[in-house]
């Protein structure tokens, strides 16, 4: 029997494997519990829903990006910093591309619900903005977050079909989207914040 402290990792890992193999829509909580060698009660005590499992995976990706920030980007432009941060995000998701594709297919009927729901895109994009040393506060910050979420969703479609080892198509798509956003929406403009001391805590927000 797995240790209780391992339950979250096991559940998320097996949920992703099932999503890739049989489709997220066809994966039940019972399937996940059986694959993880847990009872339904143990699964329920760890994650009360499939949505909670997706949210845990999203948090895992957030943390992978936040733990891999490049200090040399501090003197780069906003667009360059966001480009680096978002490419790190795609890189972190690469091992689970088929699972992520399947999960998105099950939730693509409503973009706004998708952004606020299982993948918590707005929350993640807030952290990506902060990782790029761009303010996510106030009205302007909210507009930036929503704009970045739309950029991310657009590039995600390219990433799903990008089989290159260096993710060249994904990088080209992201660069185009960021340039367009900077030119048309101005979401990347504005003064850079002074660096803050202390590490960013991925679980907050």
Image (spheres, rainbow, N blue to C red):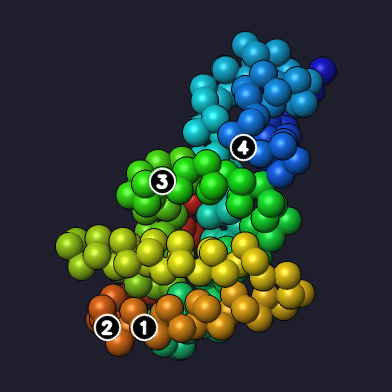
Residue that carries the numbered disc 1 in the rendered image: 180
Q: In which quarter of the image is the N terminus?
A: top right
Q: Are marks 3 and 2 in contact (CB under 8 Å)?
A: no
Question: Which comes sooner in the sequence, label 3 or label 2?
Answer: 3
Q: Earlier in the sequence, mark 4 or mark 1?
A: 4
* Mark 3 surroundings: few (<14), some (14-19) or many (≥20) residues within 10 A: few
Gap between marks 1 and 2 measured at Cα: 6 Å
What x and y, as percent, mark residue 58? Answer: 54, 47
The label nearer to you, 3 versus 2, is: 3
Mark 4 and mark 2: Cα distance apart in space: 36 Å
Q: Mark 2 points at which residue?
A: 184
Q: Do we see residue 118 in this rendering? A: yes
- Spot occupied by residue 9 in the image (x, y as percentages of width and height): 69, 36
Asked if the residue under mark 2 is in contact with the one under mark 4, i.e. CB atoms within 8 Å, the reply is no
Q: Nearer the viewer, mark 4 or mark 3?
A: 3
Distance from the alpha carbon under mark 4 to that under mark 3: 15 Å
| Residue highlighted by disc 4 | 24
């Amino acid at each position: 029997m797995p240790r209780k402290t391992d339950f979250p990792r096991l559940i998320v890992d097996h949920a992703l494997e099932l999503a890739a193999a049989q489709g997220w829509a066809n994966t039940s909580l019972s399937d996940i519990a059986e694959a993880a060698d847990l009872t339904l009660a143990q699964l329920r005590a760890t994650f009360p829903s499939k949505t909670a499992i997706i949210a845990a995976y999203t948090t895992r990706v957030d943390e992978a990006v936040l733990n891999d920030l490049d200090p040399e980007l501090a003197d780069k432009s906003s667009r360059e910093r966001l480009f680096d941060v978002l490419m790190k995000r795609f890189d972190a998701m690469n091992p689970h591309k088929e699972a992520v594709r399947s999960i998105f297919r099950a939730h693509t009927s409503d973009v706004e619900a998708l952004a606020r729901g299982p993948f918590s895109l707005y929350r993640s994009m807030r952290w990506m903005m902060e990782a790029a040393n761009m303010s996510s506060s106030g009205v302007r910050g909210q507009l930036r977050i929503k704009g970045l979420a739309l950029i991310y969703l657009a590039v995600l479609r390219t990433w799903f079909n990008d089989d290159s080892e260096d993710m060249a198509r994904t990088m080209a798509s992201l660069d185009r989207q960021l340039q367009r956003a900077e030119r048309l929406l101005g979401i990347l403009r504005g003064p850079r914040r002074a660096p803050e001391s202390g590490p960013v805590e991925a679980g907050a927000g």
